[in-house]
Image (cartoon, helix red, strand yellow):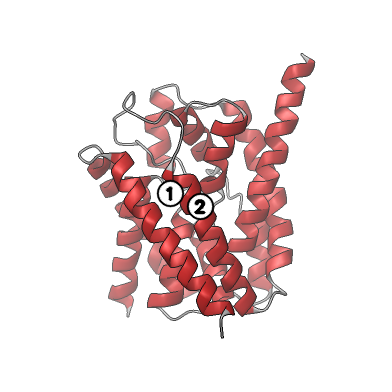
Amino acid sequence: MAEGVLRDIGIFVAACVCGVASGLFGIGGGTLLVPFLALFFAFGQHRAQGTSLIALIPPTGLLAFFAYAKAGYVSWKVGLLLIPGVFVGGILGGGLAKRLPPRRMRQVFAGLMFALGLWQAAAAWWR
Amino acid sequence: MTLIVLLLGLAAGVLVGLLGIGGGVVLVPAMVYLLHMDQHMAQGTSLLILLPPVGLGALREYWRQGQVDLRAGVLCALGILAGGYLGGLIAVPLASRNLKGLFGCFLMLCAFLLWEKPQDAGAFSSTGQETGRG
C-alpha cells in the first residue's frame, strides 16, 4: 500500500517538473513525460505514450496560458489558424508512421532538433 | 499569409503523428523562424494551440490496446497543470533573448531523450503509434 502511495507521489512530482518545462517553453510537456515514465517508473514505451496522451487531454497548459495571455504574449489569429492543420496533420502522420521505420525517423528528427537547438542557443547568446 | 500558416500547421501535425514528439516543440521554432514571431509570443501561441484535445484521435488507439494508465494519467495532468503555472511565471519576465537561448538548450535535451528510448520496437503498429507526446 505504502509503496503505491510513494509511486503516486513520485509520478506527481515528475509531472510537476514536466509542467514547469511546459510553462517555461510553451510546449505540451509530453516530450519529457514519456521518457520520465519509461525511465523512472518502468512503463513500457506504448503505455508511457498512451498515459501521456490521456494526461494531455484536459487543458493542462491553461494556467501557463493565462500567464502569457495576461502579458499579451498570444497571437490569436495564428494560433487559431494552426489548430486545424495540426489536428489533420496528426491523423496523416499517424497513418504514415505505419509505413516508415519509426526508430530511424526519430533519429533523423532528433539530429535536426539538436542542430536547431544549438543554432537557437548560439543565435541568442553569442553576439 | 493565412495559407502559409494553415500549411505550417499541417506540416507540424504530420511530424507530431509520425514521430510522436510534442506539437509545441515543433511549433515554437517554426513560428519564431518562419513567421518571425517573438519567442514569448510563439510560446504563448503554442500554449493556445495545445488547449483543445488535439491528441484525442491517437488516444483512442492506445485505449483500445489497453496501453493507458488512467490513475497515473490523472496525476500527471494535475502535476503539469500546477507546474505549468510556475513555468509561466518564470518565463514571462525573462528577457526574450535568454528565453530563446534556454529554449535552444531544451531542444538539445529533447533531441538527446528522443534519440534512444528503451524497448520501442514492434508490438503496437496501428495508427496511434508513437503519437503519445504532447
Q: On what subunit does the disc labeled 2 rest? A: B
Pointer 2: residues within 10 angstroms few (<14), some, or many (20+)? many
Which is more toward the observer, A36 or A46? A36
Q: Is residue A17 left or right of residue B106?
A: right
Sequence order check, earlier mark of 2 and 1: 1
Residue B28 visible here: no
Q: Is residue B30 left or right of residue A27?
A: left
Residue for point 70% across, 74% down: B94
Give coordinates of residue A17: x percent, y percent: 68, 47
Which is more toward the observer, B120 or B16? B120
Q: Secondary structure at mark 1?
A: loop
Give coordinates of residue A30: x percent, y percent: 53, 46
Quadrant (top left/top right/bottom left/bottom right) for the N terminus of chain B = bottom left
The amino acid type found where label 2 is placed reads: Cys
Q: Is residue A34 above or below residue A89?
A: above
Q: Is residue A105 above or below residue B121?
A: below
Outermost residue, front side: A126
Q: On what subunit does the disc labeled 1 rest? A: B
Give coordinates of residue A97: x percent, y percent: 27, 41
Pointer 1: residues within 10 angstroms few (<14), some, or many (20+)? many
Q: Which residue is mark 1?
A: B21
Q: Which residue is mark 2?
A: B110
Res. B101 image quadrant? bottom right
Residue B56 visible here: yes
Residue for point 52% across, 43% down: A57
